[in-house]
Image: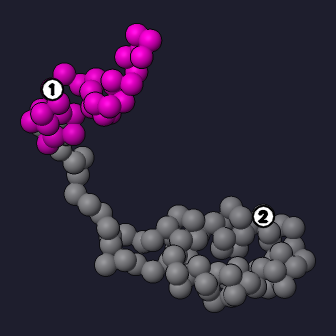
């Protein structure tokens, strides 16, 4: 080599820059990890994509997206050709309700 120590560093591995390489006090050990902020909330509340969830409720006729479609009217209204597909029992809304709107236990 021509005085470059890069090859030596690569040979030692990614942890060669850490002084303690034996692993007893590395940054990945439990002593360097904080406790979780709180309990897991999986399975509680309403799923975001259900018809009553944070995202799903936006597609209702009085929601942000559904309300805009109602103002445009025509095929985008809740009883229009496109609007019917976004209802909870429509082709698109129904599929979202089936797959993402389920409550996970």
Indicate the quadrant where residue 29 lies: top left
Residue 26 occupies quadrant: top left
Q: Is 22 in the magenta?
A: yes
- For marks 2 and 1, give the CA distance: 60 Å
Q: Main secondary structure of the magenta part?
A: loop
Task: Left or right? Give the position of 23 relative to 5.
Answer: left
Look at mark 1 in the image and give the residue it sits on.
20
Q: What segment carries the magenta color? A: 1-30
Residue found farthest to the front: 1
Image color mode = one colour
Residue at (84% x, 85% y) in the render = 81
Q: Position of residue 44 (x, y in %)?
A: 32, 70
Q: In the depicted view, which residue is nearer to us: 61 or 2?
A: 2
Give coordinates of residue 60: x percent, y percent: 66, 73
Q: Residues within 10 Å of mark 1 (few under 14, many from 20)?
A: few
Q: Is residue 12 above or below residue 69?
A: above
x 87%, y 67%: residue: 72
- Is 28 left or right of 55, judged from the image as shown? left
Say which residue label 2 marks.
Answer: 68
Q: Residue at x 44, y 12 (%)?
A: 2
Is 18 contained in the magenta span?
Answer: yes
| x, y percent for residue 90 | 68, 88
Q: Identify whether 21 is placed above or below 55.
A: above
């Amino acid at each position: 080599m021509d005085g470059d120590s890069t090859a030596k560093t690569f040979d030692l591995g990614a942890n060669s820059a850490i002084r303690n390489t034996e692993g007893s006090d590395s940054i990945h050990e439990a002593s360097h990890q904080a406790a979780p902020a709180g309990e897991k909330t999986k399975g509680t509340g309403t799923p975001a994509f259900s018809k009553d969830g944070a995202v799903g409720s936006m597609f209702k006729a009085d929601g942000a997206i559904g309300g805009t479609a109602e103002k445009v009217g025509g095929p985008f209204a809740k009883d229009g050709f496109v609007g019917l597909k976004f209802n909870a029992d429509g082709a698109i809304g129904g599929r979202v309700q089936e797959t993402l709107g389920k409550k996970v236990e």
